Image (cartoon, helix red, strand yellow):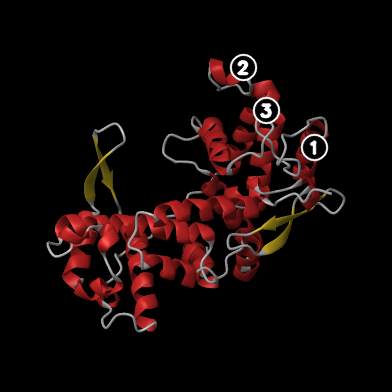
Amino acid sequence: MVKISTYSEQMKNEQTIKLRKILNGLPPFLSEYFRGIAETKSANTRYVYSLDLRLFFTYLIENKKSFGPKGVLGLEVQDLDLITVEDIEAYIEYLTYYTKTNRFGAKQGFTNASSGKGRKLAAIKNMYRYFYRKQKIKHNPAELVDMPKINEKNITVLEKSEVSRLISEVETGVNLTKDEKRYFNHVKHRDLAIIALLLGTGIRVSECAGINKADIDFNARAIKITRKGGDESVIYYTQEVAEILGQYNMLRDKVEPLKGHEGAFFLSIQNRRITTRAIQNLVKKYTRGLSFYKNISPHKFRSTFGTNLYKETGDIYLVADILGHKDINTTKKHYARMDEERRKSAADFVKLRGG
């Protein structure tokens, strides 16, 4: 019997291979670092860290005189002690806007907001903590650099009328382009099932893409999903979502997937497991005319589900559990404004005079 790899296993293997390629262009001592954090950081996090550190060391070679002659591959772990707080702060400022030559030889500009700078600084801080803890370096200048302040954004959610319109548009394809309508009849039941599942459960796009047929219990209306970080969880869905999933499942049973994709529930036109990018694109396709001021993404579906659940239950711990937030403060941060609105409205309930 052939073992069917899970989506998370496939992604982990792909990210591991990508990381190994990136390491060929990084200072040799970083191989030890990435081996050292393998048990505490996911494959995706390690891969993202490798990209961020590659940019950091490339910057240092180009802008720090003592590093230039050595080149990236000539750097040693002791060289980390030569990097100052000012060097790191200058790099963070550099990230605001910088250019790189692309594979066609043209200059391409890149920008980073506070969130992007914070992520790249986190990679540097983690690297320094590792080598400082291992007593491979004497100083940790990254610890003295403040994380950029990230302004909180208001939660964008879909109104009930917008959700209703969206479902109708997926069912009819009324606003699709001529080219999109060529494939509409082939994908409409799948697309409707994906969007209904995202809106009806609040799962992440990666969790949706990773669902196998064997993960779904249609009688119990339950799905086993793999959360970010690899933990498994069971989520439940409504009868309305069940009917939509059931319609797609009947069509899915008639399809023979390509080798290696036999277990996947949601399939692409090529009969491969659908990718996270493909799900993001189909959401964009159906929502582009839904609102002129809301930039709607799959994450907005997640926010919509979380907001509606919190309004109905008032249970922040339940919302955190169902959304798969490991830190309750993450959930509180997003939904605290709703409590503030409730407190403000409560003031109108108290009357000093009748009438």
Task: From the viewer's side, name the closer residue of 31 and 271.
Answer: 31
Splitting the image into 4 quarters, where does residue 62 fall?
A: bottom left
Residue 271 marker? none
Q: Which residue is mark 1?
A: 249
x then y, percent, for residue 298: 54, 45
Q: Is residue 296 left or right of residue 170?
A: left
Q: Secondary structure at mark 1?
A: helix
The residue beneath circle 3 is 187
Separation of marks 1 and 3 at Cα, in angstroms: 12 Å
Whether 140 is drawn above or below 64: the answer is below
Q: Secondary structure at mark 2?
A: helix
Residue marked by disc 2: 182
Residue 287 in view (yes/no): yes
Q: Position of residue 56 (x, y in %)?
A: 28, 59
Outermost left residue: 65
The residue carrying pointer 2 sits among few (fewer than 14), some (14 to 19) or many (20 or more) residues within 10 Å by Cα, namely few
